[in-house]
Structures are given as C-alpha cells and as structure tokens.
Amino acid sequence: MAKYLLLKHYRGAPAAGNDVPMDRWTPDEVTAHIGFMNDLAGRLEAAGELVDAQALAPEGTWVRYDGPGRPAVTDGPFAETKDLVAGWMAIDVDSHERALEVAAELSSAPGAGGEPLHEWLELRPFLEQPPTITE
Amino acid sequence: MTVDETLLRTLVPRVTGVLVRRGADFAAAEDAVQDALVEAVRTWPTDPPRDPKGWLVTVAWRRFLDATRSETSRRRREVRVEDEPGPGPAAGADDTLALYFLCAHPSLTPSSAVALTLRAVGGLTTRQVGEAYLVPEATMAQRISRAKRTVAGTRLDQPGDLGTVLRVLYLVFNEGHSGDVDLVAEAVRLTRQLLAAVDPAHDARPEVAGLLALMLLHHARRDARTAADGSLVPLAEQDRSRWDTGAITEGVEVLQAALARDRLGPMQAEAAIAALHADAASVAETDWVQVVEWYDELLRLTDTPVVRLNRAVAVGEADGPRAGLAALADVNDAVPRRTAVEAHLRERDGDRATAARLYAEAARAASSTAERDHLVRQAARVNQG
C-alpha cells in the first residue's frame, strides 16, 4: 500500500480543459459537481482507499520566526501570482497506477455544461517508513 | 439488551461528585468514573445492576483506589486513602452544578472547557469527543489532561459563574455534530440537566432557561436545514412542515416561563427571536417588526457585530432592502457573512450584477464547505438570471 496526496489548486496549476469559473455555471451544474465529489469520496471510503479529504480557505498568511521574544513575522494574504492549494484528498492505494486512476476520475468531475473539468491535479507520494526487511 | 448510554451518562457528574467528597482529587476521580463507565457498558447488558448509581460509585471508587495504590507504590509512598470510606453527604444537584462550574472555569480556554465538560459532565469518552471535533484521540486526551491540570487546585464547593457555563454549552450546540455522538442533542441534554440543578430562585436561572429554549427552537428546525444531498437550505426555503412542533412548543413554554421572571438577558432575547421564526408559517408571514424590536433589545444587552449583522437582515425584511443596506452600514466589513447578507439585499434591491459579484466574494470567504457551496450556487443562480 502507498499513500498519495492529490492536490487541487486555486491557482498555479495549468489551465483546466473546461475552464469556466464556478459562479458562471448554472446552479444545477454546481450541484452536479458537488454531488460527484461527495460520491467519489464515498466510494473511495467504501473501498478502503480514502485517508482524508479537506478543503482550504483561499486566504492564507506566510509566517516565520523572528527571534526570541519577538512576534512572528507575517506576510500576506498571498500575492495573486503565487501557487495556491484549494484542498486535498489523501488516498492509500495498492499501486501508482491506481493512484493515477483515482486522480483522473477526480479530474473528470463535471463542470460547465455538465462536461468533465479536465482539471490538472497534482499527485504526490507520501514519504513512508523504512521497510522492516531491507535485505 | 444494550445499555442506555444517555441514562448512564446522566449519572456521571453525581458519581464524580461522590468520589471528590470522599477525598479523591478531581482529575483522579474523573479518570476512575470513565473506567467505571467502560466497565458498565461491558457488563450491564448481561448483568444489569439494581442500583446503577451505587454500582458506578462502588466500581469507580475501587478503580480510584487501585490507581492511587499503584501510583503510590510506584513512587514508594504511603497509601493515604482509606479503603472503606464513610458515606458522604447525599449526592445531588449541588455536585452536578459544581462540576459544570469547574469544567467551565474561566482559567480554561473555550476548547478545553468544551472538551472537559463533554467528558466530565457529559460522560463521553475521549475518543468520542475527539471524533466529534475531528481531532485524533491522542490530541484530545492531551487537551483534556491539560485542562484537568489547569483546574486541579480549584475546589468543588466554590460557586461559579453561570455565564461561563452557558457560553460553553452554547459552543457545544453551535458547532454542531459529527462522529457517533450527536453534540447538538448532547448540548440540549446538558442544558436541561443544568436547568434542573440551578436553584429556582437564582437570578441567572432565566438565562439558563433562555439558552435551553434557544436550543430547542433551533434544534426543531434541524432536519429542514439540510437537503438530502447535504446542502444548506436557508430559512426562507425550508419546508416548515418538517419543523419539530414538539420541540417548538416546549421551547416557547420554557421561554415564556423565563421571561415572566423579568430578568432579561441575551439568551432569552435570542430565544425570543427564534420563537418568532418558529411561530410563522412562512418568511412573508413572519412578524419582522417584532423581530427587529428584539434585535434592538439584544443590541442593548450585548452590542456585537454579529447582532448588528442579523439585525440588518431583519430590518431588510421589515422595511425593505434599502433600509437593510442602511443598517448594514453600521456593520464592520470584517464580520463573517456580511458580504453574503449584502449580496442578498442587493439582489432584492434589483442590482443583480453587484449581488452576483458579492455572492462569489462571500463564497471565497466562507468558513465551511456547505456554506461555500451554497453561496457559489447563489452566485450561479443570479448570473443565470
């Protein structure tokens, strides 16, 4: 088994195939999209492959340590040009091929006109524990 | 047969109170009661006790002694606790109330107070509390033991502030429910139990009743608030035949009895507003003028940005969108949901382009996926029009 993170971007990913902003869809298309996402998460959970799925607010802040006794340094909200993660789904699957399959299915979620989004998702393997048997 | 866990959990604060009066410190007593609950769930289905509370006290006390002994022998200290304590004074409402105060102690952060209340007063397990707030059990266990250390030096017989207890219960109710425990129902149960424990002559009792009424009146609408697919249904579109009339009737009665005491507070005012909504057959038939009057009252009692925002919504319904927008001018831009409220008022005022832009903006600022999805749908709807 191997864990993968599927990252969805607000910004920074290549443009989706069906690239119409969500507030320009019809309400039914929005509903269909959300239904598809929930349904997929439900199926992955039933298959024992879902680890976690979370959505993030678009507004965030950069923070860093600024020395003892000083308040943290902050920067933000993020500039428009920066890569911005919208949310993730973590899965635990048997193979890289299966991870690609799940990502492709997620990317096929319906968008404007009920057509698949063809959205680019970022697939990142988790670094795992070293194996018990090494030789 | 299964154990009635809710009934079992009503005994928790009283059993803990008995252990504390026998000389156990709060943290150890609370752990011992948790152990006894686990034991009860395991053995009661096949071997139900005749006196559930006596059974819990006996088992919890034994657990406490075992834990104290192993702790003391580990530290090579003397056993200081007597095996067979004399019977303490009768346990009752006082113990329950004392535990509420302790778990909502002002030295605790809100999240710690909530977690401790659900465990030590509500009798939930750490796993259940963790699940309900979507944090790992180990994290919740740390939060609870830190909270217990914080209140370790507080004596149980000190009178506390009912206001802090009400805020904790309000938080439990308002944050909703997940996991295998229904936190909304649990908050109602704990508030009901609190009301029963407070002296009828206590000045703050009407506010406890006000909170119970507020919860019942909102709880009554819960089924109608979400559609089958999990999406939010706003008040205006709710199928009011799905409201729980039993809960509404009880809420109104509790509220009327509280208002008769003439000790108005914010909880009663909020409950009065909820009662006016519950009483109306539709949004159009709602007595918005009276709703605005209650918001004026609430503003006098507690002038918060959220109250101002909700008042602006009511003004919009009572006197039209222009008046609502004027009232909104007094609300700080940073208040959550302000943009969504303005979008709604702009749409009613006929400015669809601005409304669509504001709905989309509000969606980006939403703090939950259900709210975000709802606002995206609103933006989409107005753009289509």
Image: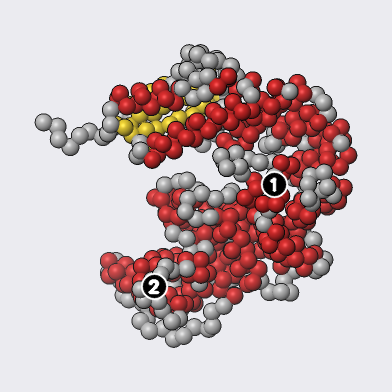
Dot 2 falls on a residue whose secondary structure is: loop
Residue B259 location, quadrant: bottom right
* Residue at 28% from the left image edge and 28% from the top image edge: A95
Residue B13 seen in the current view: no
Please tell me which residue lies in front, B155 or B66. Answer: B66
Q: Note whether B233 is above or below A16 in the view shown.
A: below
Position of B360 with respect to A35 (left or right) is right
In the rendered view, how is the structure colored? Answer: secondary structure
Residue B373 seen in the current view: yes
Q: Looking at numbered disc 2 in the image, what kind of residue is underneath it?
A: Trp
Numbered label attached to residue A42: none
Residue B102 location in percent, x, y?
56, 64
CB within 8 Å, label 1 to label 2: no
Residue under pointer 2: B44
Dot 1 falls on a residue whose secondary structure is: loop
Q: CA distance from mark 1 to mark 2?
A: 42 Å
Q: Mark 2 belongs to which subunit? A: B
Q: Looking at numbered disc 1 in the image, what kind of residue is underneath it?
A: Asp
* Residue at 56% from the left image edge and 59% from the top image edge: B186
Badge 2: residue crowd in 10 Å (few <14, some 14–19, many ≥20): some
Q: Note whether B326 is above or below B383 in the view shown.
A: below
Quarter of the picture containing the N terminus of chain B is: bottom left
Residue B51 location in percent, x, y?
45, 81
Numbered label attached to residue B239: 1
Q: Note whether A122 is above or below B115 in the view shown.
A: above
Residue B304 location in percent, x, y?
74, 45
Badge 1: residue crowd in 10 Å (few <14, some 14–19, many ≥20): some
Label whose residue precedes the other's in the sequence (1 or 2): 2
* Residue at 84% from the left image edge and 34% from the top image edge: B321
Q: Mark 1 belongs to which subunit? A: B
